[in-house]
Amino acid sequence: MAKSWRSDKLGRLGSSIFSEVAQWKAEAAGAGHEVIDLGIGSPDRPPTESVRKALAEAVLKPDRYAYPSSQGSIAFRQKAAQWLRWRFGDAAAVDPETEIVTLMGSQDGLAHLAMAVCNAGDTAVVPNPGYPIYSAALALAEVQAELLPLRADNGFLPDLDAVPENVWQKAKFVLLGYPANPVTSVANAAFFERMIALAKQHGFLFVHDLAYSEMGFGGERPMSVLQFEGAKEVAVEFHSLSKSFNMAGCRIGFLAGNAVAVGALRELKANIDYGVFGAVQEAGIAALDEGMSGAMEPAGKLYERRRDLFIEALAAEGWNVEKPRATMFVWAPLPDMQWTLPDGGPWNSRRVAQEMLLRAGVAVIPGDAFGSEGEGYVRIALVEEDDRLIEAARRIGRFIRGES
């Protein structure tokens, strides 16, 4: 009898939407479309010249080719701790020796944290809709997921009062991220204080994903949970240099906060990888230094300008979408489609995204890829220059109207 060489866990990882969209893009290109890709949230600009120079110089150092430390160099961890204190105040001070671990991007840590802090059969709470790795990581760790709905009528914040007491009691950790991907919402001080209080009351770890810390708009300054009193007793926070410093391909980020949870992830990583290439860590140090110096324009300025341009262009085409307050995304309710599908099928998130790509050559991600509560929306990434965003809006308008 033949044995299966495919783990059952793979079937529990959730949507393979990014592979599916890649196939749609190939079909659209084959049909003659020049595809405008507003799907994956990968910055379209490089790091600054000084960061690239730091990387280039570090790559030439002959001592950079031994195995790096799995927890990251002390130099990078010290710089990350300095940046946290600079950005969020003295209350966010952490010990670089015990309260920070360097990661190959925040997704590395998000994928492995459940394995490090949970046992098989434990329960964790994650948002719906939410970044796909949140739930996929639980499947890999054989941890049960409790889904916390994020809905428009509550500003895409969880209704904490509606969560049954037994859910808080059995949760090993609760994972949320603000500014949020994909829903672009932000949280205030009262929210973080409430989450810290709940974590202390019920004994769970609060995990905050702050990948978009530098992408607040209109004066919005995203907050760190670590800046609040008592946070390090019950919370950890993921940070990434991918979006804030255009270093997505470098794969560098870090987890900071509660020493026990940080230590658990550090111990797991010591058994499964050898850490981030030292030259990339040197580039990360240069990026954090440049951010603190004020020499570089904050990432949020670029995406705020793109947001305004794109939302206005969509409105001119008849699709009115609320402006996001943060992130590099637009979380858009489905447009009022003015034509009927040839097969008579319904207009849902997946069908809008697929047909928009195949007929108009514009790639977006259907909301249901982020969870059942994402149905009725598409996520649009602002990762093209101005002229391309305006062209994308024009194409989308023709698509909505059913024009060829």
Image (cartoon, rainbow, N blue to C red):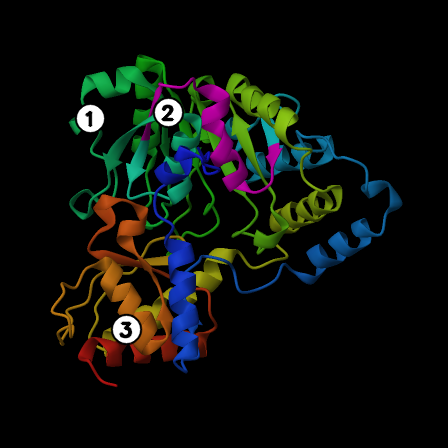
Residue 261: horizontal and vertical position, in percent?
51, 20
Local SS, label 3: helix
Local SS, label 1: loop
Residue 194, placed above or below residue 218: above
Identified by mark 2, the residue type is Val
Locate residue 270 relative to residue 300 in the image: left or right.
right
Q: How crowded is mark 3: few (under 14 residues within 10 Å), some or many (20 or more)?
A: many
Q: How far apart are marks 2 and 1 (CA)?
A: 19 Å
Identified by mark 1, the residue type is Val
Q: Nearer the viewer, residue 148 or 301?
A: 148
Residue that badge 1 annotates: 163
Identified by mark 3, the residue type is Leu
Locate residue 242 relative to residue 305 in the image: left or right.
right
Magenta stretch, residue numbers: 102-125
> Can residue 358 be seen at all in this image of the molecule?
yes
Q: How crowded is mark 1: few (under 14 residues within 10 Å), some or many (20 or more)?
A: few
Residue that badge 3 annotates: 314
Q: Residue furthest front?
A: 1
Residue 402, placed above or below residue 136: below
Locate residue 180 relative to residue 45 in the image: left or right.
left
The residue at 53%/16% (across/down) is 260
Image quadrant in which the C terminus is located = bottom left
Residue 328: horizontal and vertical position, in percent?
42, 57
Residue 118: horizontal and vertical position, in percent?
43, 19
The residue at 35%/37% (across/down) is 12
Residue that badge 2 annotates: 143
Q: Could you tell which of marks 2 and 3 lies nearer the N-terminus?
A: 2
Select label 2 or label 3 by which is in front. 2
Q: Could you tell which of marks 2 and 1 lies nearer the N-terminus?
A: 2
Discs 1, 3 touching: Cβ within 8 Å = no
